[in-house]
Amino acid sequence: PEFNMENNAEAAISEFVATFLLMWAIYILNWELHFGKNHYIIKQFLTAVAIRALIEFFPTAGPAMNPMLATCWAVFGVGGKFTFPTDNEHYFVYWLAPWAAAILASITYGIYNGDKIFGHKLPIGPLKGKKAKKD
């Protein structure tokens, strides 16, 4: 993935938002929606659709939404240098922004679901309604 070095803040924001939304799509598809016996196939298809949509909606930085994917592309996909990126912008956009987005998405899902965050129960949540018990 490449982006204009003059616009690295916008690229980082794009990567952050795309990763945050991807994490929520994964949480919802895996833990909230149930598709019966075809759950795995439907979930994989919808995850692929979500990834493709995020790539189209957030094209500023690529987006990789995966730090290792972006770094492998930079190491093996550009020229014949086979060296890690030396510019800090790469790590800011493709490592720090997705990492921060994944942590924030996990915290917000934990609040929504009423889970512990880093081993601590938060004073807010769960925001999700409880299911009625079947008799």
Image (cartoon, rainbow, N blue to C red):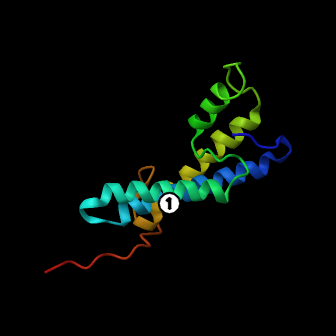
Q: Residues within 10 Å of mark 1 (few under 14, many from 20)?
A: some
Residue at 40% over, 65% down: 114
The residue that mark 1 highlights is: 24
Q: Residue 121: x percent and y percent? A: 42, 59
Residue at 71% over, 18% down: 81
Q: How many marks?
A: 1
Residue at 54% over, 54% down: 51
Q: Residue 112: x percent and y percent? A: 45, 67
Q: Amino acid at mark 1?
A: Trp
- Say whether residue 122 is visible: no
- Could you say which quadrant of the image residue 133 lies in? bottom left
Farthest residue, direction right: 6
In the rendered image, the quadrant that contains the N terminus is top right
**Horizontal arrangement in the rendering, residue 101 relative to residue 126 (left or right):** right
Q: Nearer the viewer, residue 115 or 106?
A: 106
Q: Residue 26: x percent and y percent? A: 45, 56
Q: Residue 39: x percent and y percent? A: 31, 59
In the rendered image, the quadrant that contains the C terminus is bottom left
- Say whether residue 59 is visible: yes
